[in-house]
Image: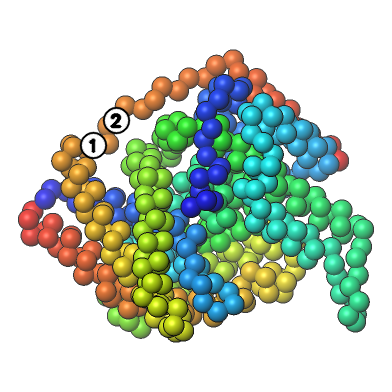
Amino acid sequence: MDVSAKQLKRMVYAALMAALTAAGAYIAIPIGPVPIVLQNLFIMLAGLLLGGRWGLISVGVYLLAGAVGLPVFAGGTGGVGKFVGPTGGYLLGFAAAAYLVGVISESGHRRVAIDVLAMVAGTLIIYAFGVSWLKVVTGMSFSKAFAVGMFPFLIGDALKIAAAIPIARALRPIIDGSFGVARAAG
Amino acid sequence: MDELSTIGFAPGQSPLHQLDPRTKQALLMGLSAISPWGRLTFLVSLSVVILLSFRAAGIRLSRLIGDIRYFLLFLLFVFVVRTVTFSGGWIPNISVELAGEALMVCWRLLMVVSMGALLMATTRAADIRAALVWYLKPIPVVDEKMAATMVGLVVRFLPVILFQAAEISDAQRARGIERRKNPLSRLMIFSLPLFRRVFLSADELVAAMQARCYSEHRTLPDLSFSRHDGLAIGAGILISLTVLFP
């Protein structure tokens, strides 16, 4: 398989990962009082499974699809205005997080401890972007912004990080396998 | 799925439909970027234009309200958080000054979302893609054709993935998944088959694209600016200038 075929394959994987991310805004697992929304789990997995560069491309495509007005953001909306809106910071944070998770995980050669560290860093960067933008746009104080935009989600985030590790371990052979076959054939 | 199908392209012949998609995207981006500085004059004039556009495009306001109902709840929440203060003790303190400011914030956010809905309701997906290629061309690191193709794949596969997710969730419910209370295993049991399916369909898609000699060089729909676009941009600049008034 030549270079362009491999490139095509990576592109399709990243595009479908972006579609999964978009779907993650709609899919929630109904358990407990607050249903668990899967989107940031999928962001982390984009970094873990595709690596830094393609993880960033994948999330970038998701954001681009939203920016041009396709209904891929939470609540069935889209449009560049969403970036200026109160939750816009989280969206930019997603891109930074996917890249960071991918880069750290790659440099740690996929050791579990490094992967956990990568996702903790990713989660922190999502909130760093999200909460400060929420504060700027709505004019809330930092304590209010944290109470509304971060604290309610932390338990869910810890669960998602714990779940992402075995999910990534189970899925990496599928992705590596398909690229491995590509190498063997080429 | 309901959320997805509601705000969608509706064919028509209104002035907004006839505008070039690039103009519409530029207006949306420009006006929403400038909106944080807008005061009463800006908001009122923008609201009038948006209401008239909805009317001209033949989109009922009830449909818009239905589409963005969760967003409206969010706005209400922002309004309450900004208006009600607890200054000493448990008695809530509501100030008219803060309420006015909060109303302004919510109004701005509502305008931005309405403009997005207008763009989507009056522009074909293929035109959005073509406009995207045009806009991304000058940006050096981004491969605009690849980006536009990937956005196209997202659009095509989002409904498929949502359908598969619903199918998996139904199948697991039928097998009594709700008796498992551990959220961790629920997350894994749900995500694994979903990802596996998506990656398998990615492999099929790659094979299908290669079999059809996929390349980045494809013909785009023709886009052309007309006199209407000049008028629309002029109107957009006029509205933007009202930012200078209180």
Residue B192 position within the rendered picture, expressed as x and y whole percent measured from the top left: 32, 70
Q: Nearer the viewer, residue B161 or A110?
A: B161
Q: Quadrant of residue B178?
A: bottom left
- The three-letter amino acid code for the residue at tag 1 is Ser
Residue count near mark 1 (Cα–Cα under 10 Å), binned few <14, some 14–19, many ≥20: few
Residue B141 appears in the rendering: no
Q: Nearer the viewer, residue B76 or A61?
A: B76
- Pointer 2 chain: B
Decide if residue A91 is on the left or right side of residue B73: left
Q: Is residue A185 above or below residue B37?
A: below
Q: Nearer the viewer, residue A101 or A163?
A: A163
**Residue tagged by mark 1?**
B215
Q: Are marks 1 and 2 in contact (CB under 8 Å)?
A: yes
- The three-letter amino acid code for the residue at tag 2 is Arg
**Residue tagged by mark 2?**
B218
Residue under the image location 42 percent in, 33 percent down: B126
Residue under the image location 36 percent in, 75 percent down: B175
Q: Secondary structure at mark 2?
A: loop
Q: Residue furthest top?
A: B227
Residue B131 position within the rendered picture, expressed as x and y whole percent measured from the top left: 46, 32
**Which label number is shown at residue B113?**
none
Q: Quadrant of residue B82?
A: bottom right
Residue under the image location 55 percent in, 47 percent down: A78
Decide if residue B174 is on the left or right side of residue A71: left
Q: Nearer the viewer, residue B152 or B70?
A: B70
Q: CA distance from mark 1 to mark 2?
A: 7 Å
Residue count near mark 2 (Cα–Cα under 10 Å), binned few <14, some 14–19, many ≥20: few
Residue B216 appears in the rendering: yes
